[in-house]
Image: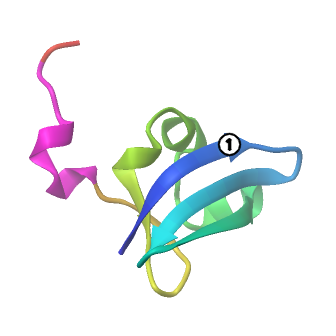
Amino acid sequence: MDPILKAQKSFNGVQIIFLSGEITHSVLYSYENMIEMEINVSSLLEHPEYYGVNPDGRIVRTDFCKMDLHSCEE
């Protein structure tokens, strides 16, 4: 799983910047792709660190496995 470094809204979708090994990649995902992957776009834009990219290119939410990202304080 490759960590997402940045997510930025664009006209046609969301530009995702992620780290694969030592190489930074930038991929545009359409809103249709996000819906198919069941990704909450507003959550992804606010907290890209909660998400990762699988080897098959799918975006998945990963913070459920990272307790240091959770806080009981609002």
Residue 64 drawn in magenta: yes
Residue at the image position 60 percent from the left and 47 percent from the top: 7
Closer to the camera in the image, 61 or 24: 24
Give the quarter of the figure containing the C terminus: top left
Q: Residue furthest right?
A: 11
Q: Position of residue 60 (x, y in %)?
A: 42, 64
State which quarter of the image contains the N terminus: bottom left
Left or right of 66 on screen, residue 11: right
User: Which residue occupies the extreme bottom position in the image?
Assistant: 56
Q: Residues within 10 Å of mark 1 (few under 14, many from 20)?
A: some
Report the coloring of the rendering: rainbow
> Is residue 66 depicted above or below 33 in this figure?
above
Does residue 18 appear to the left or right of 54 in the view shown? right
Query: Taken as a whole, is the magenta stretch helix, strand or loop?
Result: helix
Residue 56, position as x, y percentages in the image: 51, 87
User: Looking at the image, which is closer to me, 1 or 33?
Assistant: 1
Query: Where is mark 1, residue-wise?
Result: 8
Decide whether residue 37 is among the magenta residues: no
Residue 46 position, x and y percent, is 50, 32
Point 71% across, 54% down: residue? 15
Q: Nearer the viewer, residue 17 or 64?
A: 17
Total marks in image: 1
Seen as rendered, the residue at the extreme top is 74
21 over 3 or under it: above or below: below
- Magenta-highlighted residues: 63-72
Helix, strand, or loop for circle 1? strand
Residue at horizontal 88 percent and vertical 44 percent from the top: 11
> Going 71% across and 51% down the picture, which residue do you hit?
14
- Is 50 placed left or right of 31 in the picture? left
What x and y, as percent, mark residue 58?
A: 52, 74
> Which kind of residue does numbered mark 1 sit on?
Gln
